[in-house]
Amino acid sequence: MRRLVKPLIGVLGVLPLVWLTFAVLTGRTSANPAEDIILTTGIWSLRFLLASLAITPLRRLTGWNVLIQYRRMLGLFAFFYACVHLAGYLAFDRFFAFDEVFADLAKRPFITAGMVAFALMVPLAITSTRGWIRSLGRRWQLLHRLVYVSAIAAVIHYLWKVKADSTLPLRYALLLAVLLGLRLWWLRRRLPRPAAAAPAR
C-alpha cells in the first residue's frame, strides 16, 4: 500500500495542470485564459504548501508516522506550481518586460508578497534531497523553517490580490493560522516550566 501512495500523490499532483491545459486548449476557461492560468496555478501552489504543513499536525494527532515521507513530495509540488504561476505572470501579464516586473515589486504590495513567498521556496526546494539533509545536519531544520514565512507571505499575496470576494483566501488564512497555532501550542508544551518559587519564611 505504501508503494502505491507516492505514485498516487504524483498522479493527483499533476492532475490540476493537466485539467488546466485541457481547459485552455478546449476553450473551457473564462474570457481571460491567461488570468485563469495565473490564478489557478497560484491557488494550487498554496494548497500544496498548506498540505505539506498539515503533515506534521496530522502525524502527531493520528500517530501515523508514515505520513512524514510524503511531506517533501507535497512541498515540491507547491514549488512546481509556484514556478508555473510565476512563469504565467511573467509571460502573460508582463510579457517578460522585467522593468515592469521591478516596477510591480515597488508599487504593488501583493506582487512583493508573492515574490517573497517564491524566493523563500527556492532554497527549500534545492535542499530537499537526502544529500542536503545529511550535509546541513541541524542547520537543515533551521533553514526549512522558512516554509512558515513563505506560507504567510503566500496567503498575504492571495488576500491582497483578491479585490472582490475574499472568502476563499480568508479560509486559507484561517487554515494556516490553525496549522501554525498547533505548532506553537506543541512548542509551548515542550518548553520547561519555570520552577515554583520557594515559600517565604
Image (spheres, grey):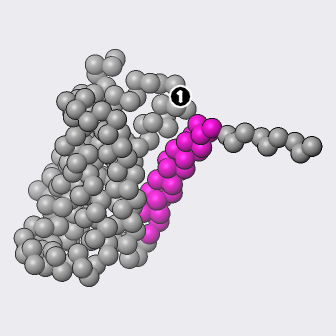
Q: Tell me where the magenta segment starts and ends, as one range.
A: 166-192
Residue 200, horizontal then vertical, whole percent: 89, 45
Q: Does the segment drawn in magenta span residue 180?
A: yes
What kind of residue is marked 1?
Thr
Residue 135, horizontal then vertical, whole percent: 22, 32
Residue 50, horizontal then vertical, whole percent: 39, 48
Q: Does the segment drawn in magenta span residue 171?
A: yes
Question: Can residue 40 be spotted in the picture?
Answer: no
Q: Is residue 145 left or right of residue 90?
A: right
Q: Is residue 22 left or right of residue 173?
A: left
The N terminus, quarter of image: top left
Residue 192, horizontal then vertical, whole percent: 63, 38
Q: Nearer the viewer, residue 41 or 154?
A: 154
Q: Is residue 64 left or right of residue 89?
A: right
Q: What residue is shown at x 22% (from left), y 48% (from top)? A: 123
Q: What residue is shown at x 40% (from left), y 59% (from top)? A: 152
Q: How many marks overall?
A: 1
Read off the residue under disc 1. 62
